[in-house]
Image: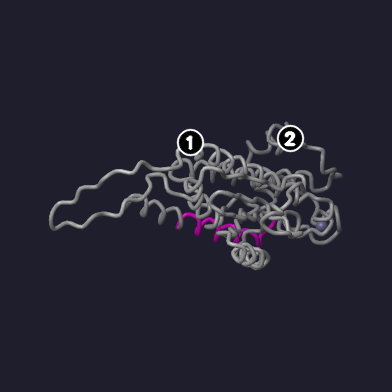
Amino acid sequence: MVQDEVRAEVEEDRRNKMVAMYQQGAWTSPTNLLCWGLSDTTACQLCNKRGTLEHILSCCPKALSEGRYRWRHDQVLRALADIVSTAVINCKYQHTPKKSITFVRAGEKAQQRQSPLGGLLNTAQDWKLQVDLGRQLKFPEYILSTSLRPDMVITSDASKQVVLVELTVPWEDRMEEAHERKRAKYAEIVVECRNKGWKARCEPVEVGCWGFAGQSLPRTLKLLGVKGQLCRRAIKTIIEAAEKASRWLWIQRGDPWSSGQLGHKSGADHPRLGRLSEGV
Ligand SMILES: [Zn+2]
């Protein structure tokens, strides 16, 4: 436990430092441009506004309307969904911890035994995961009728639990804002579900477009029962998806975009990206 605490603190420090560094860097865009590999123009080639990194990776109205940010969001969502889906499958087989009798010596207190697994997914056997990839998700009508589509809905009918997970891939400065906005957006659904007798919760998750995970990511994974090494590996996979997708958006910043062009790829095996990532 002590080691975990120390590690968490070191990790937090490291993260703060990195974020501070990139904020300094954000003011000196030529450095960033160099770091991200080559830039020759200063204007956004899509909308002609000032083409800062922030603009191109997060604020360009044309890129937004063309679905570029949506594409990146879905790359990250797919990575997150894979992990949750695996957790759902694994939990099915180890749902109930064995009950055992605990003997307590005279004068000692009985220790509260927790499930060795822990996590929401270990509290039921019948979890179902729905993911809003390709704008397919329909909120389960038997729970509630709503036009809102969270990115993930995880339900257990037997235990009447529903978890909404909403992912945002914002510019790193705006992680907190995104968190609050998403929480507010789904607050009403959560209340309505609860009124209908469901244990409901909404977990907004932010993964910054530079590949820094908000605290909400490990928190949500742990809540679901993805812990320890699994959790660390999951975070790595997810932030890599964000970083790769952003890099791809940067490389494609002046090129025409069609949302289907890459299919399920994140551009990782594209020769141009491969070369570039070696240099970064
Ligand atoms: Zn633009």
Whether residue 43 is visible: no
Q: Determine the quadrant in which ligand 1 lies.
A: bottom right
Of residues 235 and 110, the one nearer the viewer is 110
Q: Which residue is mark 1?
A: 93
Q: Is residue 166 above or below residue 176?
A: above
Q: Considering the image in quadrants, where does the C terminus appear? A: top right
In primary-sequence order, the first of circles 1 and 2 is 1
**Secondary structure of the residue carrying numbered label 2:** helix
Amino acid type, mark 1: Tyr
Scheme of image coloration: one colour
Task: Say whether residue 88 is magenta.
Answer: no
Q: Residue furthest left?
A: 106
Could you say which disc has been placed on residue 81 in the image? none
Q: Is residue 235 above or below residue 20?
A: above
For the record, the magenta segment spans 13-30
Q: Main secondary structure of the magenta part?
A: helix
Amino acid type, mark 2: Arg
Mark 1 C-beta to ligand 1 under 8 Å: no
**Secondary structure of the residue carrying numbered label 1:** loop
Whether residue 179 is visible: yes
| Residue 97 placement (x, y as % from top left) | 39, 43
Residue at image position (63%, 52%) is 210
Residue at image position (41%, 44%) is 117
| Residue 66 placement (x, y as % from top left) | 84, 51
Q: Quadrant of residue 262?
A: top right
Mark 2 C-beta to ligand 1 under 8 Å: no
Q: Which residue is mark 2?
A: 272
Marks 1/2: CA–CA distance = 43 Å
Q: Is residue 235 above or below residue 64?
A: above
